[in-house]
Each structure stands twice: as structure tokens, then as C-alpha cells.
Image (tube, rainbow, N blue to C red):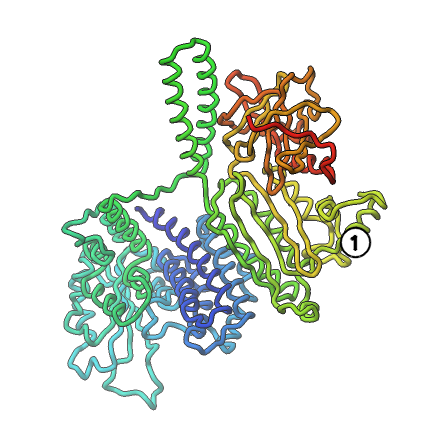
Amino acid sequence: MNMEQAMQAFIVESSELLDDMESALLQVLTEEDPGDSINAIFRAAHTIKGSAGLFGLDFIVEFAHVAESVLDKVRDGAIPIDDALVSLLLACGDHIGKLVDVAAQGGTSAGDDLTAQATPLLQQLHSHLGNEAAPGPSTAQALTMHGEALQPLGRVLGGGGARAADHWHISLRFSHDVLRNGMDPLSFLRYLGKLGHITGIVTLPDALPSLAELDAESCYLGFEIALRSEASKAAIEGAFEFVMDDCMVRILPPDSRMGEYLDLIESHAPSGEGGATRLGDILVRCGTLTPRELEDALSLQRQGTSAPLGELLVEQRRVQPPVVEAALVRQKQIKDTKGGESQSVRVDADKLDRLVDLVGELITATATASLAGRSLQSASLHEAHSTLNGLVQEVRDSALQLRMVKIGATFNRFQRVVHDVSREIGKDIALHIQGEDTELDKTVVEKIADPLTHLIRNSMDHGIEPAAVRAERGKDSRGTVSLNAFHDSGSIVIEVSDDGGGLPRDKILAKAIERGLVEAGKPLSDTDIYGLIFEPGFSTAEQVTNLSGRGVGMDVVKRNITALRGAVAIDSRPGLGTKVTVRLPLTLAIINGFQVAVGGSVFVLPLDAVEECIEFRADSSHDYAELRGQVLPFIRLRALFKVDGQPSTRQSMVVVKQGGQRFGLIVDQLLGEAQTVIKPLASMFAHLRGISGSSILGSGHVALILDVPALARQAVTTTPAHTEGAEPAQEPL
């Protein structure tokens, strides 16, 4: 791992730390004992600042240092953490993220725009510090405060900063009693000259008391030393062997040595039973950590410090974060190799997409080969193809599984949305999450985030009542928005619900009549009326706000969900709340399909939606049948799609389930199961209803994939209120 790779590791690590910081900030106010969360927030800011200092990213260090100073006082109990401070720290985390993005693009300064954005944040942070500048490095913190310690040292070295000079950086703090114990601090500095060339020294009088309190026999000085040397870290530490009990020494290697350490860690091989699989042992073996430093850190852990060893070493500035990161990766690799466990590999998303595309082409080619094999009537060829078809199906399942991700990461990002929006609109609202382990295709996850954002914001603005109204209705003053995800019949269902006042049914209907969307006096079900809010430009808001009132948003939600071959439905109860149900396919690429034929046309149904197939007795007088005592609406595909020709003498009904609704599809022939590669329809066919896509058959012909949710909505409009005259369906085929 070279310095460029180390920088990339810093960028990734910072992003993860900022996510952890945000999560901890969003839950810190709800915890009975927020100590762990406060420590996690502090460690995140502290680690980012320290790592940025190693790469000379002073513009990150300077801002993060002030935020860290406030967090340090919060951790000590000097500043109480409240809602306003949480909002400020969330904004600071966002700003640090923007600064890290600048560093990721190779920038070396914040720029005018980001500097202007930082000004109000810094003013608020300083107000928590008593209108004073953030404190400089104390005796115990000097090494970690790059803003005050390393910058002067960089000027001594010629203005290049810590990143420019290839030297060891030694932070030395002597105890007050070192002179009384017969040790001369200057003698140890002189001895360093034998190990190399001291290129710069900065004396830090930060512990110097007032003249009245000064003790001439006490030592109050600290030193930041730049040493150019080929000696090892252990040899440099050995220069202070006789004064270890009376000093604190921290030694950071030059940049060139860090690259060497990373190479040594990467090539490290374990020796002995478990002897070199521990993080500390790996760091000692590569030379970046001395045995004494390791023992000190382990001793601190034994005293009750909950921080992991790697994090502790970084906080104490004994080892650079990229080195610890590389050692942790190598440690995991060794453990996985020894235990025979599988290793995780990061793969570019484009490569996964290309793999799935190739698997789709393979499925089509296999179907073509199957047709050719049948025409030859060769038993051996048929057997070989059957084996090949099974292997292709396994490859398909494995390829699709690679793209399956948990929806929890998408759900968790809405914690911040709810936090910010609730404060913007002056409501106390909590987000409740269930089903975060539910998996679906990454493409679906990426495209569902925006519709969910609209639904959540709409629930908060329109659904949840103000606290005073909730109190009058006997509700908890804190409203709740819930997110839930689960699998159902080969689809993923996402529910966005709230415990608000519900949708104003009469108001929606009146607005729709006013706009000419429906005819006055026409009977409509509650579902139809609630569905009107998805019409473009439709809004019942009396005032236009930053969130709503312009009629923009819900129509976009429906359009985006429909584009994903999904469906959206609304259920609302006056005074109790509203639930929006989004049903999506698990994948947008390949499905198990069930093929049916009407005349010369082939249609495909998702196999998970098919419940059974029964013989159908033709009767043109009804659009419903009786199946085991229940009314079953059905749709004749020949009539729906205006297929030429006469129906076959023996027709079949495919019973399909969509959500909690069943309906039938009347077809001429059942062709059976087949793997189906989904091809999107061209924009000129976007207006077609009941069709969600297409697929290429082995014969080269095109089969249309039926849109089950759309057909379900059409079937329900033909369902009669009674069963009188219903044709009985026959027994299953």
C-alpha cells in the first residue's frame, strides 16, 4: 500500500466515521446513559482530525479541532448536550464531510465557499467554549493537536509542514520532577544527535505557570523534535530508556517509513500457533510499534478502557491510522486463512452489472439450444442440456445474490431526514424502523431512496398533527413515522406509516371535483379517492411551505415506483394515521417466469405470483367465476390485448395473487416455467397498460411480461358484489 492508497483509506475511513458520528448524535438524546455515544462521537472527530494531520490536511485539522474541543467539554460534563447542540454538531459533521470531499479531489484548502459556510458554525462552537478560541495543546494532548504543534515545526523545517519533510517526529514531555531525580533533559536531546540529524526543535512552554507559582527546580517544558535518521523506532525509543519513568514520549515515523511499514504488513506471514495474528504483534513485527508502547496500551486497556487496541493506538498517536487499517486487514486475512473462512472482496458495481447481463444472454442462448435439441430428438443431447440448464440456473441465482443488499443502510439515512425536517416544521417526530435486514437488488435500493424521502417528508408535514392537536386527541405529543420492509410473494413490500390524523377524504374529493379529475356524484371507493393525491399538481395544502403545497412530489413518487415495475397503495384511517404500501420486484434483471400463450402471442407472468392453474369453461356473460365458494374476477387476455383469431376450444385460467387479492387470467395454452430475462420497453410503448417489459424467447420471438399489479387493479373493478350467476371453475389441472 503506497501513500495514494493510504490517502484513499483515509477518505473511506473518514466517511465511515462520519456515518458513525451521525448515528450516535441522532440517538444520544434518547439514551438513559449517553456516555458511550458521546465517547464514540468524540473519537470519530478526534480520529479524523489526527489522520488529516498526518496527511498535512490542515484545513480539516483546524475545523475539526474546534469541534473536538467542544466535544471534549461535553465528554467532561462541562457542556450539557441538548437538541440545539446536536443540530450544531450534525451540521459540523456535514461540513467535515465536505472538507474530506475536497481532500479526495486533491484539494489543499477549503476554498472561499466552504470557508464562508464554516464561519457561522465556528462562531457557534466558540460560543460553547465561552467565546474563546479553542484551547491549544495541553501537556497531555500536544501530540494530537496538529494545528498548534506541527505547524510551527513545519515552519522550522522550511514551511513544508509535516507532510513535506522526511523525518521522525518526536513529541517529548518531561515530568515536573525530572530534574530532582537527577536527569538532564538536554542530555537526551544531545544523544539523539548520535542517531541522526536533528532538523528542527520547537519548545512548548504550555505547562509554564505564572511567575509567582514557578518552581526553579521543576521542569515545565515540552519539545517537538524533527529527526532525520535511519535508526529504527525501537532504537530511537531506546535513547530515553533511563528516563522513561519521568517522561512521555511519542514517536511518529516519516512518510517513507509508513510506506515501508505498509509493505511489511502486507507481506507479513504468521509464525507459531496464534503468535502473530494479534494486532499488536503484527505492528511490533513490522517495526511501527515498540514492545513498550504495546505494553502501555494493553495496560491501559486492562484498566477498563473500552476502546479497541487499534483505536487506542491511533488516539495516543503511537501508530498512523493507515498502518493500523492495513494491520487489521492483514489480521483478518490471516484469521480467515487459518479458519478456512471465506474472504470478502470489493467488486466494482459495473462488473456485477456486466456479469448479470452476460448471465441473461446465457439464459437466452440456453433456451435456443434447448429448442434445437428437441428437434434432433437425441436423448443424450436432451440429458446434457438438462444438466446445462440446471447449472445456468445456479449461476443466475449466484449472480443475482451478489447484487442483493440489505435495505437497512437506506432506511438508516432517514434518521437524519426526520431529525432535520421535524425541527424545520416545529414538530417532535421519531422514526421507527423494522425489517432493515430485508434484502433486495442494489439497483432497486438505489432508485427507491428518492420516493421514500418524499413519502416520509409528506407524512411528517401532512400526516403528523402539531403537538397541541395531538394532546387534544389524547395522543402522545411525539409523533411517529414508521418504516417497515418484508418479502411477500416474490416481491418486497415497503410500508411508510404514521400515527397522524389520516388523510382528509372529503377534502381530497372536493379538490378533485374542483379540478375536474372526477365527476361530481360519481361513486368512488376510499382507495380511489386516496389515490387522487398521486395526480400531478394535486395538493390540499392551504399554505405553500418549503416542504409541500405546490403539488409536486407524490406524482413523482408514483412515476418512479411504476418505472421500477412496482405499485403503490394508500390506506388511511381518520384520526389514526396513514399507511403507504410500496410493492417492488426483488430484482430488475432476471426472474423465474411462467409462460402462457394466447393465439400466437406468448406472455410471461412472474412465477411467484402464480397460485394455480385450472380449466376454464368459456362463458361470455360474466367476468367472474366461483372458485371454492369465493368470487374470483378474471380478465380475458385475448380481449384485453385484442389478439386476432378465435379462442381455443379448451381454455385455462391462471390464478394470480397480488398482495391480498386473487384474480384469474384466461389464456389458450399453458407453456410452463422458464427463466426470463427482463428487457425494458422502449419509450414509445410506455403508455401500454398491463405490460411491464419484454423478453427474448429461445426461438428469437418476443414475449411480453405482464404487469400483475396493473392487471389486479383492472380486475378488481369488474368484481361483482355477489356471486349470483357466477360460473364455477373446474378443478386444478
**Residue 199 seen in the current view:** no
The residue positioned 28% from the left and 65% from the top of the image is: 200
**377 w.r.t. 604: above or below:** above
Neighbour class for label 1 at 10 Å: few (<14), some, many (≥20)? few
**Which quadrant would the C terminus be assigned to in this image?**
top right
**574 w.r.t. 357: above or below:** below
Residue reaching furthest to the top: 376
x, y percent for residue 293: 22, 65
**711 w.r.t. 140: above or below:** above
On the image, which quarter does residue 688 sit in? top right
**353 w.r.t. 420: above or below:** above
Label 1 amino acid? Asp
x, y percent for residue 701: 56, 17
Please tell me whether mark 1 sits on a helix, a strand or a loop: helix
The residue positioned 52% from the left and 29% from the top of the image is: 593
**Residue 27 seen in the current view:** yes
Residue reaching furthest to the right: 520
Quick one: 589 or 618, which is closer to the camera?
618
On the image, which quarter does residue 653 sit in? top right
Quick one: 311 or 643, which is closer to the camera?
643
Q: How many numbered markers are drawn?
A: 1
On the image, which quarter does residue 524 sit in? top right
408 to the left or right of 163? right
Q: Which residue is mark 1?
A: 506
Quick one: 450 or 282, which is closer to the camera?
450
322 to the left or right of 499? left
175 to the left or right of 95? left
x, y percent for residue 242: 14, 73
